[in-house]
Image: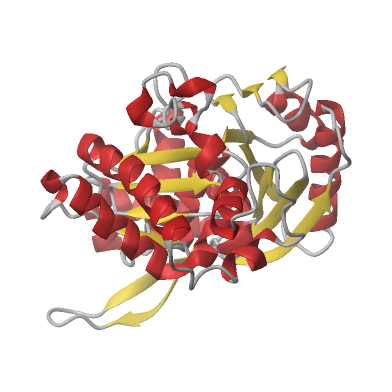
Amino acid sequence: MRKNPIVQRETLAAAVLQVRSGRATSRTTLAKALGISPSTTGLYVDHLIAEHYLNESGLNQGPMGRPRRILTTQAQAGWFVGVEFNAHRIQAVGVDFSGGLKTTVELLLPAEVLAEQVIKSILDCVAKLAVTMQGPLLSVGIGVPGLVDAQAGVGLYYAFIPDWKQVPLVEKIGSRLNVPVILQNNLRAIALAERWFGMGHGLNDYVILGPRSGFGVAIVQGGRVIEGAHHAAGEVGRWPWPLMHGAGGGQELHHALSAPATWRRLAGVGGQGMLPEDLRAGLSALAGSAGPEWDAVCADYARVIGLLHLVIDTGVFILHGPLTMLGERFCHSICEVACAQMPALRGAGLKVVPSTLGDDAGALGAASLAMEAWEPA
């Protein structure tokens, strides 16, 4: 193995990622994935087996040549926590070393919750997960709403928690748990959830559509999640709305296209209409809608997503949040209308699909953050 301990740790971690993802299933395929010699790869594999991070067992007979022994990760080597929150609730998951979802916790937050209460509640969720998980806790990933400086470990700003400004979340959580803590904007965390658990598996270019209480997108290009120079990539909800009216009369896009706003428009109840207790169920009941309200909503989404596609040229847009309850018909309608609005999109591969991950997507994405950042001691 290479003598530099930093390079050693990085290569060991990369080897585990390749095996965990299924891209490498043997020493030979792992050497190709890492771009290092088979003999050096063998030393890394032997070390990871000795430390109980990898298993090597059985025989995998390919179409030609000798059978190969199969590499897998050791699920009991430790576990990761993924946490995602907003102003109303915290969701947390416990994931084993192989990436298997083992347990979940949901905690409702009080009205007008403050930053310190959120931090305490996150710690409470981790403690509840620990009761049922096996092995040592290795690291914690947190999907944070609003603007995030992931490198500094700071939540910069979130409009719906009054004092959520410059919150040093990594320092506060890490000092209590004594493990590495990694944070990211929650939609960008969801992009990782799709890579590990959903439709983004094997894709290098895709976009997460997040019309929830607001509206943002997370962009994956060349296998990398794009943050932006000022940590604000994907804040399409801040666009002036309607687009054709320039300044938009003081409105922003999220006022018209967030999940609550979309339900109100489809239900025809006006901008201040009371929301259903279960927004997902309310949207599901409207999935078969037809008429001017449905057409107007589809036209607005088509305009936004069509413009994004002309700029980004992504492989697929993956819809998240309550609007997934509108189903594939909603997604197909968006694509059809977008191509009618913008002829340049015809033949450009525009595709919108509803995610299948459900409410755990943010927490799963945060656990994916922790898995991808893990390095052996």
Quadrant in which residue 19 is drawn: bottom left
Quadrant in which residue 74 is drawn: bottom right
Q: Quadrant of the N terminus?
A: top left
Residue 202 visible in image: no
Percent of width and height locating residue 47: 46, 52
Q: Which of 93 and 372 lies nearest the eye of the viewer?
A: 93
Residue 96 as seen in the image, left or right of residue 36: right
Percent of width and height locating residue 338: 25, 50
Residue 169 visible in image: yes
Percent of width and height locating residue 248: 44, 24
Percent of width and height locating residue 134: 73, 62
Q: Which of 94 and 85 lies nearest the eye of the viewer?
A: 85
Q: Which of 134 and 361 lies nearest the eye of the viewer?
A: 361
Q: Which of 325 and 96 lies nearest the eye of the viewer?
A: 325
Residue 230 as seen in the image, left or right of residue 136: left
Q: Quadrant of the C terminus?
A: top right
Colour pattern of the rendering: secondary structure
Say which residue appears at 52% left-offset and 40% top-offset: 256
Say which residue appears at 68% left-offset and 26% top-offset: 159
Residue 206 as seen in the image, left or right of residue 232: left
Quadrant in which residue 180 is drawn: top right
Q: Is residue 56 above or below residue 374?
A: below
Q: Is residue 180 above or below residue 94?
A: above
Say which residue appears at 87% left-offset and 33% top-offset: 117
Say which residue appears at 40% left-offset and 69% top-offset: 328
